[in-house]
Image: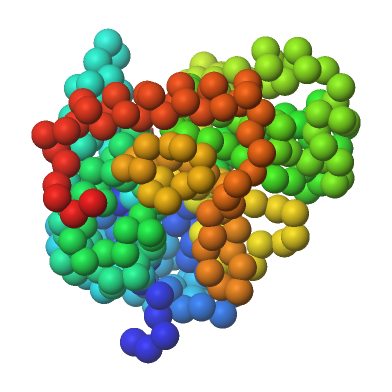
Amino acid sequence: MENVVRVAVTGACGQIAYNLLFRIASGELLGKKQPIALHLLDIPESNQALEGVKMELQDSAFPLLQEIKTGSDPYKLFKEVDIALLLGAKPRALGQERKDLLHENGHIFINQGKALGEVAKREAIVLVVGNPCNTNALILASHAKGLNKNHIFAMTRLDQNRAKGFLAEKSGSLVKDVTNMVIWGNHSSTQVPDFTQAKISGRSAQEVIQEKEWFESVFIPKVQGRGAEIIKARGKSSAASAAAAVIDTLVSLREETVEGESFSLGAFSQGNSYGIDPELIYSFPFRVEFKRLKQVNSLPIDPFILKKMKETEKELIEERQLVENLLGDCL
Ligand code: NAX
């Protein structure tokens, strides 16, 4: 099959996948002309459900969808993939310690990192969504021998989208008019939605919304706590908005970034200009220029924001220490 882009999705029976797979197959991820093969991976216990998802994809008769593979062996399912969207992870159980979740999910990413390194395309793009996504991506990268480390990411786009929505609502603007909304650090409650970089219709967000107190004590905690707010309201975690953020991330990686805009992505911190520890997966702003992905460096950082950037860095360093025994030697 020539010209087919192979997209692996783990956690393919989960609720994010159910909101994502049909959008990928319809061409929203890679454009309306790009033929696609979907490689769907979940645990063996989900085999039957996985067949159900496959049947529904077949029944949708998507013209671009040329092949569907299903299974639970990453060495088979990641073979020759161009893109791996890693949603599969266990949710935190009631009363479970963060450390135990890090370990439990960490093991998944050791195995998947090794498999991707062995059988995926060398330049494959890997987006880790399963939580704790930054540290899972770090574990994966440390085992993915042969993969381009600069193509391994953790998703913070949902946080960016949420923050844009709140700024639009507060200022009575449209979401499309809010630009350069930067998320720094960990995809957790220590993340830093940097309102000082954001623009609304080309003007500084702080100039448009002249309420310093609102930014610091309402906006930031609202973005940080939105995931929990959704769980409280819906009884389940964000799924459709998470799927939308996956699509947005991949579209941003493939299209030229418009003037004055950036998008946020957890990525290797090596070589960053903000003094962040160089061996973390930390969220930074990026742009695509002349088909190349570039970290946006040397932005002026407000002292209040800098303090918060160091706090989220500290949390990521602690997470790295907690999984030290799970890290491989490929970093
Ligand atoms: P679900 O619990 O609905 O689905 C998870 C799926 O993963 C299940 O089908 C499960 O069988 C599968 N799975 C578990 N271990 C696996 C393995 N080793 N290999 C393959 N599949 C495996 O969760 P869902 O709501 O879809 O969320 C998926 C992940 O995304 C969770 O870890 C969640 O915390 C995380 N999220 C991350 C977000 C982000 O912005 N980075 C936002 C949304 C979401 O909370």
Residue located at (57% from left, 27% from top):
306
Q: Residue 37 location, x and y as percent?
A: 37, 72
Left or right placement of residue 189 versus residue 115 in this view = right
Residue located at (28% from left, 71% from top):
122
Q: Residue 136 location, x and y as percent?
A: 29, 40
Q: Quadrant of residue 276?
A: top left
The image quadrant where one finds the N terminus is: bottom left
Q: Which one is nearer the viewer's eye here, 129 or 253?
A: 253
- Above or below residue 13? Residue 79 is below
Q: Which one is nearer the viewer's eye here, 237 or 321?
A: 321
Residue located at (47% from left, 26% from top):
310
- Above or below residue 312? Residue 176 is below
Residue located at (51% from left, 45% from top):
273
Left or right placement of residue 196 versus residue 68 in this view = right
Q: Is residue 199 visible?
A: yes
Left or right placement of residue 207 versus residue 112 in this view = right
In this view, which residue lies farthest toward the left? 325
- Above or below residue 189? Residue 127 is below
In this view, which residue lies farthest toward the bottom? 2
Q: How many marks?
A: 0
Left or right placement of residue 286 versus residue 212 in this view = left
- Above or below residue 191? Residue 154 is below
Q: Residue 309 location, x and y as percent?
A: 51, 28
Q: Residue 230 location, x and y as percent?
A: 55, 24
Q: Which one is nearer the viewer's eye here, 327 or 105?
A: 327
